[in-house]
Structures are given as C-alpha cells and as structure tokens.
Amino acid sequence: MNIGIYIYNRAEVLDFSGPFEVFSSASLICPSGNPFNVFLVSEMGEAVTAACSYSVNPAYGFHNHPPIDVLIVAGGDHTEELEKQAVIDWIAEVGRKATLSASVCTGAFLLAEARILTTQKVITHWEDILDLQESYPDLTVCESKRWVDEGAVITSAGISAGIDMSLHLVSRLYGFELAEETARYMEYDWTDKGKGLL
C-alpha cells in the first residue's frame, strides 16, 4: 500500500516525519512482508525547507509519484499552500482516488480547501480550531481529541498527534497487533489508542 505524504516549505517537521516513522517501522517489523511503501511528495519534487530550516529531499513531485493509496497532508505554515491552485487541485485529485485521505495539524485546511473535507467532524492544532471553524463553517471542528476518524478521511490534532493517528491507520489497514508492536518498537507511549472519535 502506497502512503504518500505531502510536504512543503515551512511544513512542521514532526507532522511528516512522525507518520513516516510509523509506517516505515510497521513495515520493518511486520512478520509477513512490507505492507506499506511510504514516501514524501512535494510540488516540484525538489528539496523543501521545512520548519526551523530543516531541509528535506522528497522522493517525488506531482509529476512522477506512483499511485497513492493513502494521502497524508502535513501541517505547518500552510497559508501560501492555500493560494496555490496547482496544490489544491492535486490534493483534490489524489484525495478522490485514494482509499484514505488524512491530515496532521493544519493540513486539515488544505484538505478542506480541496473539498476532501466538506461536512465531516475534524480536528486540528488547538491554536487553529477557531480559524478552521470560521474558514469552513460546514465542518464540525472537535476539541480534546488526538485524531478523528470519519471513514474515508482522518484528521489529527497538532504535531505529535500525527503519530497517534498513523498508529490508528496501521491498526485499521493491517491490524491492531502490528500497530501495538510498532508503538513498542518506536518506544512510543501510545496512550490514546482507541480514544479518537470514530
């Protein structure tokens, strides 16, 4: 299963590296092969300067990535991305074709702008809850949740919550046992397992 994570300039580092670690670790320890092929995608496929001047080399751009089964959109300073029609169109197209779409933190704004999120329950970073609700009033923006599962679309709260959401995705896509073993391998205290909104 191809897990494509969209990144861009000033994306929050843990928003994409956390999910990347979860899916790559799950594949590493899975006893029956590699269930997940996780990769980073940027608009042009060129190096991206994430938050705090963290330089990242994505594997693909919009023009050459393989089919994406699960699209994850990272959060961060997303304002410029909202103004890029090519980005919004790509998220809309890939999100409609994917089995699942997900966001970490303010990545929910991009999913909403692309109409992948329309009337669902969602979550984002606590600082951005009011802004998301005002910008997209048809959404029901939740509070005090690590992640919200609405079937074909899953959103998470800020930064580290993307790890919890990704472990939930491993549980959904492959099985709870692998998700638990992945958390143990990562030495991650997955205290909220099963506590997202379903």
Image (cartoon, helix red, strand yellow):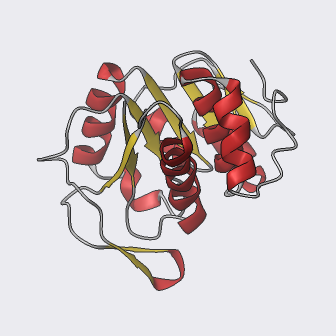
Query: In the drawing, does residue 119 fall left or right of residue 46?
Result: right
Q: Is residue 106 above or below residue 30?
A: below
Q: In this view, does 54 lie above or below 1?
A: below
Residue at x-position 67% and y-position 35%: 179
Please provide percent x and percent y for residue 149: 66, 23
Residue occupying the far left of the picture: 63
Query: In the drawing, does residue 189 fall left or right of residue 174?
Result: right
Residue at x-position 46% and y-position 70%: 10
Please provide percent x and percent y for residue 12: 55, 65
Q: Can residue 14 be seen in this view?
A: yes
Q: In this view, does 11 lie above or below 71?
A: below
Residue occupying the far bottom of the picture: 53
Please identify the quadrant where the C terminus is shown: top right
Name which quarter of the figure residue 140 lies in: top right
Q: Which one is in front, 87 or 19?
A: 19
Please identify the quadrant where the N terminus is shown: top left
**Total marks drawn?**
0
Name which quarter of the figure residue 58 lies in: bottom left
Please provide percent x and percent y for residue 39: 35, 51
Residue at x-position 12% and y-position 47%: 64
Query: In the drawing, does residue 87 fall left or right of residue 137?
Result: left
Residue at x-position 68% and y-position 53%: 185
Q: Is residue 123 visible?
A: no
Please provide percent x and percent y for residue 181: 70, 41
